[in-house]
Image: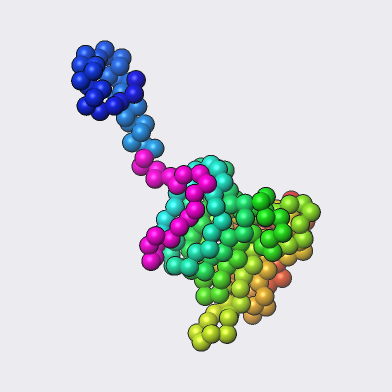
Amino acid sequence: MSNYGMYDKLMNPWLTVEEINDEAQESALDDRVKSLDLLPVGALLEEDLKTRNQWNLGAGTYGAFTHEVAHNVIRGVVAGAFFTKRCKINGHASVFGVEFTDLDDEAATELVRVGSNAVVSFVNCIFRRDPKSEANLVYMEDEDGVANSVAAKAVFIGCVFIKGGPTAINNPAGAPGATNVQAIGCVNATGNLVLGANITETGTVST
């Protein structure tokens, strides 16, 4: 039985034990769902704060984003949170348990671009390109020539890379920047021997 607050109580002053239990259970479930603070499916991950924006995602497709501020957190609360167009991260960030694909943007040069000066951690994420694609999955920007600029850095932990071109993680910073991009305990399903020429891989498993 739905709970309509005071109106419901006035119209139904006498409830059975079963109805009272049903209302209590429904209220408890509502409280649990609200506590997850899930972003509605299809919504944009808008940066409302100057730092430390956080988004909890359910199963469904969410809008592509370009983020600028630092210390954002994107978290897939359940399996099946997708970004189907190219995304860009220009500030320090942490991304957990989501999938990036080119389903709605097959011509994208990469699925995710990490901007210069940004440091990003990807944990248990999936990067999947159409089998016909020859493009990158992730692109790491080099320093941009501005004073104190540094090349992008990222760590991929337990991530899965599927299909794409000859370079899954493109790090143009070159061999000296190989320690800036770490892949730890990842799965390589790209068909290539390695995920990239200028990254450090530890414990990669190939399919």
Task: Return the x and y of residue 69 as percentages of the image width and height.
Answer: 44, 67
As drawn, 112 above or below 8:
below
Determine the residue positioned at 77% across, 52% down: 131
Determine the residue positioned at 38% across, 66% down: 50
Q: Tell me if residue 51 is in the magenta stretch.
A: yes
Instruction: Characterize the magenta stretch by its predominant secondary structure.
Output: loop
Task: Return the x and y of residue 116 as percentages of the image width and height.
Answer: 56, 75
Q: Quadrant of residue 17?
A: top left
Determine the residue positioned at 20% across, 20% down: 10
As drawn, 201 above or below 141:
above
Task: Return the x and y of residue 12 as percentages of the image width and height.
Answer: 24, 16
**Residue 93 in sight from this viewpoint:** yes
Task: Return the x and y of residue 170 as percentages of the image width and height.
Answer: 68, 68
170 vs 83, left or right, is: right
- Work out which quarter of the rendered image holds the N terminus and state it: top left
Q: Tell me if residue 32 is in the magenta stretch.
A: no
Of residues 118 and 194, the one nearer the viewer is 118
167 vs 70, left or right, is: right
132 vs 59, left or right, is: right
103 vs 91, left or right, is: right
Q: How many marks?
A: 0
**Residue 160 in sight from this viewpoint:** no
Of residues 154 and 129, the one nearer the viewer is 129
- Spot the residue most to the bottom: 147
Region of the chain picked out in magenta, as a range: 34-52
Of residues 76 and 30, the one nearer the viewer is 30
